[in-house]
Image: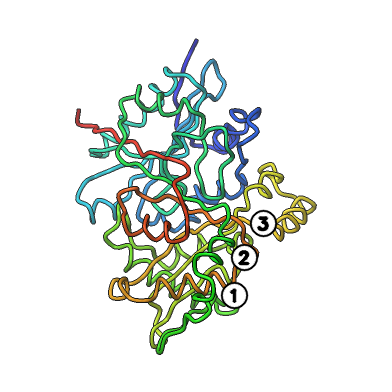
């Protein structure tokens, strides 16, 4: 058997990079095909404003001339400026269960990283901290929710054999009977949530740019000290919000204001994965109409972020957001989180107030390139 690792430097190899998962998961009933044009847009360094301060390299490993593994490497200059360590992030990792292919793939990527002075290689980030991240490490018999990684069980072993060790652990949390839980637990308490000087309102699609800036302002302050967090630019927020109308509803993104200034955000999205799966990665006009029809029937919602400015984190803002969301989400049956660190006590406690319990587990992996 002959292995070869090559950089993705032309359209032919980029197409092979993008299509490899469709080969790997062709018989997997749980896999949800990504929309190929969106993955392409995310990896386009000229279009994605994240890459204004980061470099991207893509690699493919061929086995006897056939693509068998892939990898993206990102070096973010702003991360080094903030955290003081020159770190590279890997992502978009996919592979057959082939230890040699993965060893060669990472070996080539690590040589490139060392040449750039990188000390630590960590991931998966697809491609950054506000995208899909982590490796699924349990419940492989279940389908992923929207914005949730999905991978075969053998990926962890492949990374460990390539010299990686777990650097962080996360979990999602879920309540499959959220509507009933809120009614029983809180009842009429949720009907009288207003407080003088405070308002909670849904985002306005008519004034979306204004509200995206309010969300950015709150998130950048609230998450400033969080693990790996880097402030988002206006351009990055606008780029990530391109399809906002398709993945949520205005009343599922709430902005809390105090004296007309934004102080908190509750951002939820629909679990569009069952509808997304039917697109098969390449939506056409008829598939798109079907997607819109299926989207109307979704009863599962995912809490994408809850962000509250520091001065208001021990105020009533969280309760105001919760009460308003509960009133506006009467038809929601299941509520789920994106990733939460088990060590993040405030986030875990907030999820528990909604009757949510741990669901799936995920891990991040890192390798010291100095060793």
**Residue 245 numbered mark, or none:** 2
User: On the rendered image, what quadrant is the C terminus found in?
Assistant: top left
Inter-mark Cα distance, 2 to 1: 8 Å
Farthest residue toward the right? 286
Q: Is residue 97 left or right of residue 12?
A: left
Q: Residue at x 76, y 58 (%)?
A: 293
Q: In x, y percent, where is residue 149?
A: 50, 42
Inter-mark Cα distance, 1 to 3: 21 Å
Q: Is residue 279 left or right of residue 356?
A: right
Q: Which sits earlier in the primary sequence, circle 2 or circle 1?
A: 1
| Residue 361, quarter of the rendered image | top left
**Residue 92 numbered mark, or none:** none
- Secondary structure of the residue carrying tag 2 is helix
Tell me the crowding category of disc 2: few under 14, some 14 to 19, or many 20 or more residues within 10 angstroms, Cα based. Answer: few
Q: In x, y percent, where is residue 341?
A: 35, 49
Q: Which residue is mark 3?
A: 298
In-front residue for pair 172/126: 172
- Secondary structure of the residue carrying tag 1 is loop
Q: Is residue 295 above or below residue 89?
A: below
Q: Which sits earlier in the primary sequence, circle 3 or circle 2?
A: 2
Q: Which residue is mark 1?
A: 205
Q: Which sits earlier in the primary sequence, circle 1 or circle 3?
A: 1
In-front residue for pair 119/99: 99
**Are the residues flagged by discs 3 and 2 in contact, CB closer than 8 Å?**
no
Farthest residue toward the top? 1
Farthest residue toward the front? 184
Q: Residue at x 47, y 70 (%)?
A: 322
Q: In x, y percent, where is residue 248?
A: 59, 63
Tell me the crowding category of disc 3: few under 14, some 14 to 19, or many 20 or more residues within 10 angstroms, Cα based. Answer: some
Q: Is residue 338 left or right of residue 220?
A: right
């Amino acid at each position: 058997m002959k292995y070869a690792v090559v950089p993705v430097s032309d359209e032919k190899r980029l197409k092979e990079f993008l299509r490899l998962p469709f080969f790997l998961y062709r018989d997997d009933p749980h896999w949800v095909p990504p929309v190929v044009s969106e993955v392409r847009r995310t990896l386009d360094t000229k279009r994605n404003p994240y890459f204004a301060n980061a470099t991207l390299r893509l690699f493919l490993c061929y086995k006897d001339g056939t693509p068998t593994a892939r990898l993206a490497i990102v070096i973010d200059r702003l991360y080094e400026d903030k955290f003081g360590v020159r770190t590279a992030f890997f992502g978009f990792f996919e592979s057959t269960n082939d230890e040699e292919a993965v060893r060669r793939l990472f070996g080539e990527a690590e040589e490139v990283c060392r040449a750039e002075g990188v000390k630590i290689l960590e991931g998966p980030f697809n491609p950054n901290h506000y995208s899909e991240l982590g490796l699924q490490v349990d419940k492989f018999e279940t389908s992923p929710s929207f914005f949730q990684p999905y991978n075969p069980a053998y990926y962890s072993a492949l990374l460990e054999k390539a010299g990686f060790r777990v650097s962080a652990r996360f979990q999602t949390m879920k309540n499959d009977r959220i509507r009933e839980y809120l009614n029983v637990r809180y009842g009429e308490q949720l009907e009288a949530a207003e407080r003088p000087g405070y308002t909670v309102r849904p985002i306005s699609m008519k004034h979306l740019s204004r509200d995206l800036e309010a969300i950015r302002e709150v998130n950048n302050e609230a998450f400033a000290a969080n693990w790996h967090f880097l402030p988002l630019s206006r351009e990055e927020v606008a780029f990530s919000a391109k399809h906002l109308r398709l993945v949520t509803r205005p009343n599922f993104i709430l902005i809390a204001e105090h004296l007309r200034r934004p102080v908190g955000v509750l951002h939820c999205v629909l679990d569009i994965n069952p509808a997304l799966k039917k697109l098969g990665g390449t939506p056409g006009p008829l598939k798109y109409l079907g997607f819109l029809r299926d989207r109307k029937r979704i009863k599962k919602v995912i809490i994408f972020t809850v962000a509250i400015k520091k001065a208001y984190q021990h105020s009533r803002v969280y309760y105001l957001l919760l009460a308003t969301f509960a009133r506006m989400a009467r038809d929601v049956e299941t509520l789920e989180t994106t990733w939460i660190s088990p060590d993040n006590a405030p986030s875990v406690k907030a999820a528990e107030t909604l009757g949510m319990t741990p669901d799936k587990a995920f891990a991040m992996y890192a390798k010291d390139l100095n060793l």
